[in-house]
Image (cartoon, grey):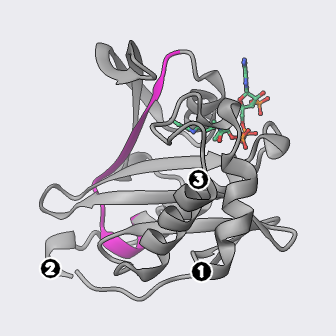
Amino acid sequence: MTYPPTDLHTARLLLRKFELYDVDDVFNYANDPEWARFLTAPTPYTRADAQSFVEGNSKSEWESNTMFAIEFEGKVIGAIGFRFDAPNELAMLGYSIARPHWNKGLMTEAVLAVNDWAFEQFGLAKIYSFADVENVGSWRVMEKVGMTREGTLRSHGVLRGVRQDFHYYGILRSEWAGNLGCEPQGMAER
Ligand SMILES: CC(C)(COP(=O)(O)OP(=O)(O)OC[C@H]1O[C@@H](n2cnc3c(N)ncnc32)[C@H](O)[C@@H]1OP(=O)(O)O)[C@@H](O)C(=O)NCCC(=O)NCCS
């Protein structure tokens, strides 16, 4: 599968590939233990961590590492991306946004855009994701975009040294509201 880096525009956001000059913006929001609470990101988060994250995402091949920077009012305030499983026509979604911008509907807006893009482009059968059961904001986003809670996996990972339960959510191609006659095309063929 090959495809070029893509920009997606929503009402308030520009979603685009990371650039090397984004390091300071990423450091500004990621240097916050509350932002990192449900993530595997290092804490404390150093400028070197931001540099490594931005370099990894800006220099890598877009199709092997599909991670959009979330730009709002000229600054990068978060990231959203997919890990594709082409043989199974699946994509796993992941995201984060800076704390000053929580609860403004911005991640819901971003997820709707990237899910539409991924379903349209790749003939996916399903997009899925998961969130710590205590990360209400994250699983509310998944519910607001039409994903269904498929189950709760108990003690399914470790966050900050503590075993955690995770809600898993998914949306099938047939449930995707943006699917207006778009013909499925197997990812493996692309
Ligand atoms: C999770 C996260 C991405 C949500 O982004 P966001 O832009 O705030 O999301 P939205 O504003 O689109 O939606 C959040 C929803 O959760 C609700 N919410 C948030 N915290 C809540 C809480 N403690 N209890 C109940 N509802 C809560 C909000 O009210 C909103 O729902 P509403 O629109 O029905 O009112 C953001 O908090 C974040 O980046 N957190 C840190 C990183 C992270 O946890 N990433 C996800 C890992 S799985």
Q: Is residue 149 above or below residue 2?
A: above
Which segment is the magenta one?
Answer: 119-133
Q: Is mark 3 within 8 Å of ligand 1?
A: yes
12 with respect to 57 (left or right): right
> Type of residue at label 1?
Leu
* Mark 3 or mark 2, whichever is nearer to me: 3
Residue 69 percent coordinates (x, y): 61, 67
Can you tell which mark lies on residue 111? 3
- Residue identifier under label 2: 189
The answer to whether one can see residue 181 in this image is no
Can you tell which mark lies on residue 20? 1
94 with respect to 47 (left or right): left
Residue 27 percent coordinates (x, y): 68, 57
Determine whether label 3 and label 2 are within 8 Å by CB. Answer: no
Residue at point 14% right, 79% down?
189
Determine whether label 1 and label 2 are within 8 Å by CB. Answer: no
28 with respect to 178 (left or right): right
The answer to whether one can see residue 1 in this image is yes
Residue at point 36% right, 69% down?
65
Residue 87 percent coordinates (x, y): 12, 61
Q: Residues within 10 Å of mark 1 (few under 14, many from 20)?
A: some
Q: Quadrant of the N terminus?
A: bottom left
The quadrant in which residue 144 appears is: top right
Secondary element at image label 1? helix
> Type of residue at label 3?
Val
